[in-house]
Image: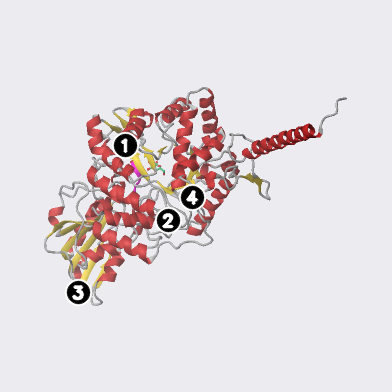
């Protein structure tokens, strides 16, 4: 056997060792790279909690110092198809059959539909409920937090104890973007306090027919003003930050609801809501698109598609509107969410409807009920290539981008509740009420002296915070009575006048004529709360009871002032000649004191009509 020289043997040993080391390093690199380069493997885990749920940590997408785009790229690469589909589902909280499903299906977003509250309806109970939902989301493999969305369209109206601001129509009467920005910021404070991180406001529909039950949810009939106020609202809301938590806005309802024609509703119970906007492209752009253009400039994080049609076809299936205009022309980089059950409404083939809506540009589907069927349909659509993987990735990218912008991964779990209904917020709401009042008529009657000897007050909305708040307050269709915190318009009057002034209240103006005339009679009347199509009405007007009350009050008062609490102009042409002063108060919310502030001259009338009101 040939003796191998020592010199040569050294080389062989070195070679063997070198090969061994590089082999080992290659193995280690490949093994460890499973925790960094990330193929989308279902079995991937990095570490496990005591409860045997395994998570990832210290990964690029969890690093808040990295650019959002890089975090999204990293996270998207790690996601399985099932996890991506889960992010596209928006579920109503009462439709979650088992909270473990939040983790099992990787659900990306949950909402409280109007009135869907925990029992008891307290800020603490809301906080605990949402915290629990987030806990299930955190248990998922990639711990992607959920969006929790609500309709906080005049303050956090669902939650008992919140400050209730004027509905948008009243803010529209102020035409004051700075005030609207402040109201939005205060709203963000009160929703964020209980863990809500997404609200379905502002409503940027531009109302053209006040018979529409959603008139009061809009800023009025002027697209330019709606754009200015909508932009301010979005900036105010999305600029708020507390313990890392921020709130995302939703510009809704894209597009054309405000221009629907009477009698065209696709809902048999309604007349114009969810109707058909029969407009040319140019008309649609002129009357309805402007506010959404402004919203996109304000970096609105989501846009909700309406349940309406444009020239006979459902907007939700319209690629030209949802993709060509929103993305191509306006550069919208947030996500598009469908409205309540809107994908499936009045459809025969729900699978086909889902495919159409997603391909048209819907990124997240407000199902809001059946996430299991949604998941199986989406898997089927991907398998059949009815929906491409690229389209799903694009939708999820937009949703994740919004989540990162909202700081969801950086939220510091609060161990305390941020106070709601603060004095600061109530004072702001009162200021908004003052600035929203519009003086429609005045025969030298207002402002009223605080030193009158006798004032009569009457009417359905005088002593009723539910009436003055309107719908989307505690319940979808609103409430009746005084069981939420705030000040009635009647108490605002009582608080304002001198100690020598006698204020008497009778709901239907049952004042004895023998007691002599009041110096002034104030009738506070208006509409009972309604939401959506339930407010569609052929001729908006005062009730016969209210008209009777005003007439009775007029007979026992030297002067009569009528304060109208309504979501829109009412037809008073036949009666206004008999009244000395008329004030539009819209739906002022919980801080009714703001009405007396102006009625008795501490502040001037500043509001102007957000929609035409012919007297
Ligand atoms: C609705 C409304 C929409 C609201 C959504 C969630 O039906 O059309 O404005 O944001 O449901 O409550």
Direction right: furthest residue: 1
Work out how far the residue at label 3 is from the one at label 2, CA to CA, in angstroms. Answer: 46 Å
Q: For mark 2, what is the residue? A: 241
Work out how far the residue at label 1 is from the one at label 2, CA to CA, in angstroms. Answer: 27 Å
Between 341 and 223, which is closer to the camera in this rendering?
223
Percent from the top left, x then y, of residue 72?
49, 40
Q: Which residues are magenta?
A: 528-532
Which is closer to the viewer, label 4 or label 3? 4
Q: Earlier in the sequence, mark 3 or mark 1?
A: 1
522 to 530, vertically: above or below: below
Work out how far the residue at label 4 is from the one at label 2, CA to CA, in angstroms. Answer: 17 Å
Count of marks placed on residues: 4
Q: State ligand 1's quadrant.
A: top left
Between 389 and 287, which is closer to the camera in this rendering?
389
Q: Is residue 416 magenta?
A: no
Name the quadrant containing residue 605: bottom left
**Of the numbered discs in the image, which one, if any, rests on residue 451?**
3
Q: For mark 1, what is the residue? A: 330
Q: For mark 4, what is the residue? A: 65
* Residue 487 in view in this figure: no
């Amino acid at each position: 056997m040939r003796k191998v020289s020592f010199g040569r043997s050294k080389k062989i040993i070195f070679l063997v060792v070198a090969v061994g080391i590089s082999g080992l390093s290659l193995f280690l690199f490949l093994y460890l790279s499973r925790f960094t380069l990330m193929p989308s493997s279902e079995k991937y885990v990095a570490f496990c909690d005591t409860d045997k749920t395994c998570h990832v940590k210290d990964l690029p997408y969890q690093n808040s110092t990295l650019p959002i785009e890089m975090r999204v790229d990293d996270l998207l690469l790690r996601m399985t198809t099932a996890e991506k589909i889960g992010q596209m589902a928006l579920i109503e909280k009462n439709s979650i059959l088992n909270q473990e499903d939040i983790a099992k299906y990787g659900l990306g977003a949950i909402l409280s539909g109007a009135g869907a509250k925990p029992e008891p309806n307290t800020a603490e109970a809301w906080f605990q409920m949402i915290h629990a939902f987030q806990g299930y989301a955190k248990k998922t493999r990639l711990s992607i937090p959920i969006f929790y969305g609500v309709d906080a369209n005049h303050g956090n109206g669902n939650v008992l104890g919140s400050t209730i601001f004027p509905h948008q129509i009243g803010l529209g009467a102020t035409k004051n973007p700075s005030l609207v920005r402040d109201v939005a910021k205060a709203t963000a404070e009160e929703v964020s306090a209980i863990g809500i991180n997404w609200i379905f406001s502002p409503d940027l529909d531009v109302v053209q027919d006040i018979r529409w039950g959603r008139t009061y949810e809009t800023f009025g009939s002027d697209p330019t003003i709606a754009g200015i106020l909508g932009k301010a609202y979005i900036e105010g809301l999305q600029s708020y930050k507390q313990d890392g938590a921020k709130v995302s806005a939703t510009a809704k309802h894209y597009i054309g609801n405000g221009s629907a024609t009477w009698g065209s509703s696709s809902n048999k119970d309604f007349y114009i809501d969810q109707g058909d906007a029969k407009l040319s492209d140019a008309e649609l752009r002129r009357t309805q698109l402007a506010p959404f253009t402004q919203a996109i400039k304000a970096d609105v994080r989501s846009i909700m598609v309406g349940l309406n049609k444009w020239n006979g076809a459902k907007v939700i299936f319209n690629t030209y509107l949802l993709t060509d205009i929103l993305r191509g022309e306006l550069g919208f980089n947030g996500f598009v969410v469908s409205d309540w059950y809107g994908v499936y409404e009045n459809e025969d083939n729900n699978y086909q409807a889902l495919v159409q809506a997603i391909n048209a540009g819907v990124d997240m589907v407000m199902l809001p009920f059946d996430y299991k069927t949604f998941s199986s349909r989406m898997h089927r659509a991907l398998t059949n290539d009815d929906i491409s993987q690229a389209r799903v990735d694009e939708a999820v990218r937009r949703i994740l981008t919004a989540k990162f912008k909202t700081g969801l991964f950086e939220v510091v779990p609060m161990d305390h509740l941020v106070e709601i209904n603060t004095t600061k917020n109530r004072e702001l709401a009162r200021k908004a009420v003052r600035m929203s009042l519009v003086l429609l008529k005045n025969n030298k009657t207002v402002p009223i002296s605080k030193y009158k000897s006798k004032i009569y007050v009457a009417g359905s909305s005088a002593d009723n915070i539910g009436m003055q708040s309107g719908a989307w307050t505690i319940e979808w269709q609103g409430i009746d009575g005084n069981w939420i915190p705030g000040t009635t318009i009647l108490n605002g009057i009582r608080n304002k006048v001198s100690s020598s002034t006698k204020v008497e209240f009778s709901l239907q103006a049952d004042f004895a004529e023998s007691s002599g005339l009041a110096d002034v009679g104030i009738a506070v009347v208006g509409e009972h709360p309604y939401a959506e199509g339930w407010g569609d009405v052929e001729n908006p007007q005062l009730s016969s009871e209210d008209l009777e009350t005003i007439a009775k009050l007029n007979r026992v008062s030297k002067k009569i002032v009528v304060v109208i609490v309504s979501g829109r102009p009412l037809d008073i042409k036949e009666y206004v000649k008999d009244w000395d002063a008329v004030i539009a108060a819209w739906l002022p919310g919980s801080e009714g004191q703001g009405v007396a502030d102006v009625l008795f001259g501490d502040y001037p009338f500043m509001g102007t009509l957000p929609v035409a009101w012919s007297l």
